Structure formats: C-alpha cells, structure tokens
Amino acid sequence: MSAPATTPVPAHVPQLPAGTPLAWRDGQLHLEDVPLHTLAREHGTPLFVYSQAAILGAARAWQDAFKGRDALVCYAVKANASLAILRLLAAAGCGFDIVSGGELERVLAAGAQPGRIVFSGVGKTHAEMRRALQAGIACFNVESLAELDELSAVASECGVAAPIAIRVNPDVDARTHPYISTGLRGNKFGIAHAEARAAYRHAATLPWVRVVGIDCHIGSQITESAPYAEALERVLDLAEAIEADGTALAHIDLGGGLGIDYAGEAPPAPAALWGELFARLDARGFGARRLIVEPGRSIVGNAGVCLTQVLRLKAGEAKNFCIVDAAMSELPRPALYQSWHRIVPLNEPPVGSTPPVWDVVGPICESGDWLGRDRPLAVQPGEFLAALGAGAYCMSMASRYNSRPLPAEVLVDGSHARLIRRREAPQDAWQHELS
Ligand code: LLP
C-alpha cells in the first residue's frame, strides 16, 4: 500500500479509521492503490470492496500475538463468508470457527484443514454433527447437556469419537450492545459456570466423547481488555477444578469478540490484549496450554467498504434525506443495532465547505432502513459514497428483502482489483422457486 496523501480533508469528513487500507490521494478515496470511484463505475453499486493486505495484515496481527506459544487462530466465518476471503485465510494458516453445516461446506471448499475447524452454536443438527465428525474437525464447542448426549449418540453411530470442549457461560458483562453480548446469565449460550464441572464429569462417562478443551465467548465488538481478563480467570478456575477431577484439557478457547474502530473506538490490538492475558495464564501455570481464538470482525471489519450511489436528495419537513442505492439489505447493522458506520464521499469535497446534514437512507420500504443519521455531506445525485467498516457482518448478513438482488464483491490487491462475487440478476433469486 502506498503512503496516504497529505492533502487536507475538510473537517466535516469523518477521519479514516486507524490502520485502514483507505487513503485520500489526488482528491479521490483509494483502497490500497485503487481509486474506489473506478470500481463503482465498472461494477455498479451497491458494491463491497475488500483489501487483501488489510485482511492478511489483521490475521497476521492475531498470529503474531501468539508467537512462541501454542495457538490456533480460527477465523469466525460468520463475519464474512466469501469464498475468496476464506481461501486467503486458509492459505495464511488460519483455522475456522463455524456455526452451521453451510459454513462447514464453505470452509472445506475453500481448502480448510478439518483439523483446524471448531464448530460452535446452540443448534447443531444431527446431520451437521455427522458431517463434521466424518470430516474430522478439531472440536465441537458443546453448548448444552442435551447436545452432549446427542453428539455422543451420533458419534457412536458414526464410529468416530467426538472431540469436544464445553462452552462455559462465565456470566461476564462484555459491555457491548445487548444483541451481541453472549456471556451473561440471561443469554442462550453455553453451560452455566456453576454447572460446567458436573457437565465435564458427565462427558467423561461418555465413551464416544473425547474431551479436548474448554471454551467461552462473551460477546462481540468488545473494546476493552477487562471483560476478557475476567472471563479468562473464571474459565481458569473451572479448568483447575475439571483437571482436579481427572479430565485433562488440551486447549483453552477464549472465543472472538475483539472490536474495531467504527466511530473512534480504540480497542486493544491482539498483541496488547494477549500480553495481558498471557500474564494471567503464566501466573496460573497455563502459559504452555494450547490456545484457540475465534476472531471475526477484527480480521475483516475495517478491511471492507460498501460503495453506494446517491439516487436523489429529498428535503423533508423535519429532516433532509439522502437516498442511496444501498439499504438495510446490504448494511443491516444500523437497523439492527443502531450502529454507526462512517459515510464518506469518494470525491474529496472542497476545504472550507459546510454542507447540509442528511439522513442517509436506502430504498427499502421501512423507516428502519437507514445507513446513517445527521451526516454532513456535500453530495449531489449520481455521486458515490462509501460506508466504512463494512467488511464484517454486512455481506454475510445481506438479504434479498424487497426482491433486491445480492450485490457484487471485489477484492483489491495493490493496484489490482478482482471480482469475487458477481452481482445477482433478479432471476437468480427465484431459481429454486416452483410455480
Ligand atoms: N465465536 C463465536 C462463538 C461467536 O458467536 C462469534 C460471534 C465469534 C466467535 C466472532 O466474534 P467477532 O470476533 O466477530 O466479534 N452481527 C453482529 C455480530 C454478531 C456476533 C455473533 N457471534 C454485528 O454486526 O455486530
């Protein structure tokens, strides 16, 4: 990536996030060495564009945080499941955290090594268990006693012992949005801390279950290290008790959840977070234990943008609306979590301009279909905008609501841009329908 230009950007334009592959050069927003407006023109909008260097750099930052330790970085596929991205990460030595049979097939198609796959989720079906057992995955993260017994029965039918970790709900507040907080007593995830020891005793009696580890995941978009430290201490308390009961734990999986800079948040880098966590692991004699992490957002989130074109401007009675061709179908996070994504023009506006303030909204027939509220933007119909932080939980959560075809995706590597998903035609969406 070339150095960012030094040209001053007007104060109303959001600062680009730290460590971004984006830069202003010659008045144009570039991703790596590609001016984004050329991609918007060539491929149409809405369009997702990702930086290969940013994805690989973020994965490397995770791997480097564990240098000299025994660890496996399992990318959480749900953040962005595009095959080309999974292929990049598999080739970079990442494992994968999956939560469905669909994700299993995707990572296998992308060249994942089965021995580097962990399978999380509260609702694994028997068919999914069977397929994962036959593929030879590293570990099932088991979320209930019922699942443990069912997995044991399926494993016995298959004649393959199931490697398991029990996902413990540590009852720790991740201090994030309630919809993406998963380690609290009231959440559907994991087995309660107080019941986990008994669950391990039960697992030890099941001949087709092989205990390999302990697991927890407390939430997503976590921006401080304290909740992780708290969760780790609680997991280690349990690990000591479980091992005292005679069950060895080959690995500790602390899940994913590290946040990114959407609006100036400053989460710790993986190395800083794990520096702190290793001090605790070392102090308690677990420093040499195999570690698994499941980062998703922190690998792809700020590696991607969603490009959109301004369709028209509409002055309302109470608000001004900037109507764009992307919607909650491609960028569902504002509608779902009231989340904030930076929205920037692809052409740098003149310095000193004080543009009007707009609610940036999509064409979908719901008032919840907004991408950003009260944004100062110097825009005209036909111009392009980029929603930043769109690499995670956007395309992977995209829908065809209002019969909108799924958008295209492009992967940039230096000055080279490659289409990794063709834009759907309306007909593609009805190919499985019978009339
Ligand atoms: N492991 C497990 C078991 C998970 O449930 C998740 C995310 C991850 C790992 C990856 O977490 P990450 O590192 O990406 O934070 N759609 C929401 C986020 C949902 C996260 C669900 N679980 C959003 O857009 O904010």
Image (cartoon, rainbow, N blue to C red):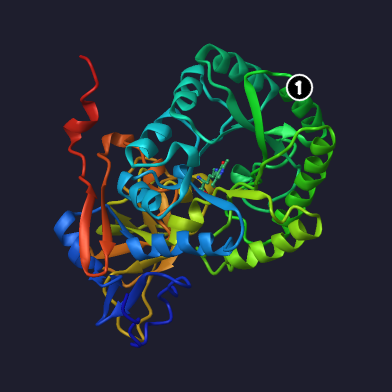
Whether residue 321 sits left or right of residue 368 in the image: it is: left
Quadrant position of residue 415: bottom left
Q: Horizontal and vertical percent for residue 303?
A: 39, 61
Please tell me which residue is depicted at 73% across the width and 49% down the height of the picture. 173
Name the residue at the top extreme: 157
* Observer-nearest of 119 and 239: 239
Q: Residue at x 62, y 19 (%)?
A: 208
Residue 352 drawn at (x, y percent): 36, 86
Q: Which of 348/396 is in front? A: 396
Occupied quadrant, residue 375: bottom left
Q: Nearer the viewer, residue 363 or 292?
A: 292
With 180 as the anchor, is 328 left or right in this view? Answer: left
Residue 256 appears at what percent x and percent y?
58, 49
Question: Which quadrant of the rendered structure holds the C terminus?
Answer: top left
Q: Quadrant of ligand 1?
A: top right
Three-letter amino acid code at the position of disc 1: His
**Image coordinates for residue 291, horizontal then vertical, percent:** 63, 50
Depicted 387 relative to depicted 264: above or below: above
Secondary structure at badge 1 equals helix
Write down the quadrant of residue 405 in the picture: top left
Looking at the rendered structure, the number of numbered marks drawn on it comes to 1
Q: Crowdedness of circle 1 by 10 Å Cα count: few (<14), some, many (20+)?
A: few
**Residue 260 in sight in this render:** no
For the question of whether residue 308 can be seen, the reply is yes
Q: Which residue is mark 1?
A: 202
In this rendering, the answer to whether 281 lies above or below 117 is below
Horizontal arrangement in the rendering, residue 393 relative to residue 220 (left or right)? left
Mark 1 close to ligand 1, CB under 8 Å: no
145 up-or-down from 197: above or below: above
Q: Please state, as top left, top right, bottom left or bottom right, where the N terminus lies in the image.
A: bottom left
